[in-house]
Amino acid sequence: MDNKIQKTEVTENMKTKLLEKYYSRREIAEKFSVDTGTIYRWELRGLLTPIRVNSRVIRYRESEVLALVKSWTD
């Protein structure tokens, strides 16, 4: 039974990650009216985790962007 529960949890986590929206630096910068360099500095400070699609394409999880915004309003 525990094995079935674990498989279900893994499957749900995989679905969540696959369905989650991802943003480029430019999209985030436009949304918050800041320079793309600011997004890079947020990354360096550990506020956003980059996901490298390939050597030239970086994306950020929507959930992390929303968590960052929420932290500003708390």
Image (tube, rainbow, N blue to C red):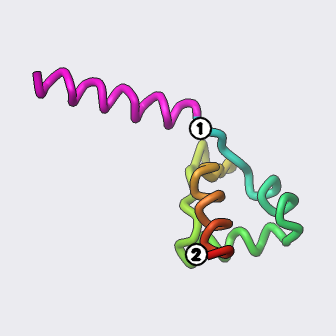
Q: Give the range drawn in magenta.
A: 1-19
Residue at 57 percent of width and 49 percent of height:
52
Q: Residue 29 carries which label?
A: none
**Dividing the picture into quarters, in which one does residue 3 lie?**
top left
**Relative to 56, 4 lies left or right:** left
Residue at 10 percent of width and 21 percent of height:
1
Residue at 58 percent of width and 31 percent of height:
19
Identify which residue, 23 or 13, lies in the foreground. Answer: 13
* Element carrying mark 1: loop
Residue at 68 percent of width and 70 percent of height:
40
Tell me if mark 1 has few (under 14), some (14-19) or many (20+) residues whose alpha carbon lies within 10 angstroms of its own.
few
Circle nearer the N terminus (2, 1): 1
Check the picture and name the quadrant holding the C terminus.
Answer: bottom right
Residue 13 within the segment the image draws in magenta? yes
Q: Is the magenta stretch mostly helix, strand or loop?
A: helix
**What residue is pinned by disc 1?**
20
Above or below for 5 versus 62: above
Above or below for 10 versus 40: above
Q: Position of residue 37 (x, y in %)?
A: 77, 73
Residue 37 within the segment the image draws in magenta? no
Viewer-nearest of discs 2 and 1: 1
**Dividing the picture into quarters, in which one does residue 9 lie?**
top left
Which amino acid type is marked by label 2? Leu
**Relative to 3, 68 lies left or right:** right
Q: Position of residue 56 (x, y in %)?
A: 68, 50
* Element carrying mark 2: helix
Which amino acid type is marked by label 1? Glu
Q: Where is residue 2 in the image (x, y as percent from the top left)?
A: 12, 28
Distance in Å between CA atoms under marks 2 and 1: 23 Å
Q: Where is residue 39 in the image (x, y as percent from the top left)?
A: 72, 68
**What residue is pinned by disc 2?**
44
